Amino acid sequence: MSSTAHVETHLNVVEKLLSNGFNHLQVNKNYIFPPNERPQIDEVSHSYSIPVIDLKDLDGPARKSVVNEIKRACEEDGFFQIVNHGVPETLMKSMMDVAKEFFEMPLEDRACLCSEDVSQSARLSTSFNITKDKFLNWMDFLTLQCHPLEEFIHSWPQKPAACREIAGTYAKEIRALTLRLLAAISEAMEKDSDYLNTIFKKHRQVMNINYYPPCPNPDLTLGVAPHSDATGITLLMQGLVSGLQVLKDGEWFAVEPTPNALVVNLGDQLQVLSNGRFQSVEHRAVTNSTTARITIPTFYGPSLDAFISPAESMVDEDHPALYKGFTCGEYFKAFRSQGLKGKSLLDRFKIQNGQ
Ligand code: OGA
Ligand code: NI
């Protein structure tokens, strides 16, 4: 992008931010999804809920049985909640408080972070990709590159005053937990516990703080349109306000918040590495008219130079490779440019007619 283009998109983001200090009394037409893509809020089902996995015994003698539970959830649900995960409750609360404070600060304290340049290690934006989104998502987000932390933390916001320290500590805790999960998932793939750690090369960790202000028309809008995550694995702190929904057997189900649990879901990279055995499940967030909602997902996966293709332990005569190999960088570029469209991006990397 040229520098004039940068200035223009910067101003475009600033202008479109929902967290601008005003209450929204009506929804601008750019946020109204066509009738067949609206969320049908009243039809959401509660008859299925994602499994809850207790990690208390993950590093003890009962490891095998916890790994098996994780394996079953990866195969059948693609989503699960974890408890006794080791991230201190006080830290989760401080992280949520800082996030809230950030979005409640006056716009002039945040406007300098507004950018559509994805190479920025800290940036504030809205929707998903405002230069491409046909319908805007009812969400602002701050996105922070987190690994290696020393490389990025100096570019993170200095306001609120506790931001760097708390978000830095949270990022480190989440990374440690994610590495434990990746070891377990490697074992669930019949590989050494170090398998995914190695495949991910230098690793990439990105933390988002998603802010969904109250919306006057939850039936016409979406907080995040249906998509699967382009990453390896996502760990989401959902807070106490519901809004996340997962698609299972063609039906949308709410993921109700469980205090202090984290929601885990597999991303497209793990679906490819597992040769389709593990599911990267389509999900979305709906809005509500009364309560601002903040969620903090951490997207964790391979660095952009890592090459991703089905693991050989997952491929045999009965299970031929389903996906072409690609670099993670290629995949992200395609994700960014095609936008949030269910699972259609992953389909583009499928092997068709033997090629
Ligand atoms: C995401 C996402 C869901 C939520 O940011 O990729 O799916 O509830 N968020 O915020
Ligand atoms: Ni997502």
Image (cartoon, rainbow, N blue to C red):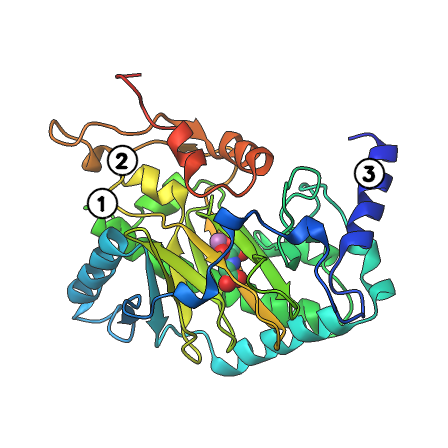
Judging depth in this view, the residue of 56 and 254 nearest the camera is 254
Which residue is painted at 28% across and 57% down in the image? 77
Q: Position of residue 182 (x, y in %)?
A: 34, 54
Provide the residue designation for mark 1: 191
Residue type beneath disc 2: Ala
Check disc 3 and report its element: helix, strand or loop: helix
Check disc 1 and report its element: helix, strand or loop: loop
On the question of residue 207 being in view, the answer is yes
Q: Position of residue 315 (x, y in %)?
A: 19, 32
Task: Answer whether labels 2 and 1 touch (C-beta < 8 Å).
Answer: yes
The numbered dot on residue 6 is 3
Marked residue nearer the N-terminal end (3 or 1)? 3
Provide the residue designation for mark 2: 311
Q: Nearer the viewer, mark 3 or mark 2?
A: 3
Disc 2: CA contacts within 10 A as few (<14), some (14-19) or many (>=20):
some
Judge whether 88 appears above or below 188 on screen: below
Picture quarter with the N terminus: top right
Residue type beneath disc 1: Lys
On the question of residue 122 being in view, the answer is no
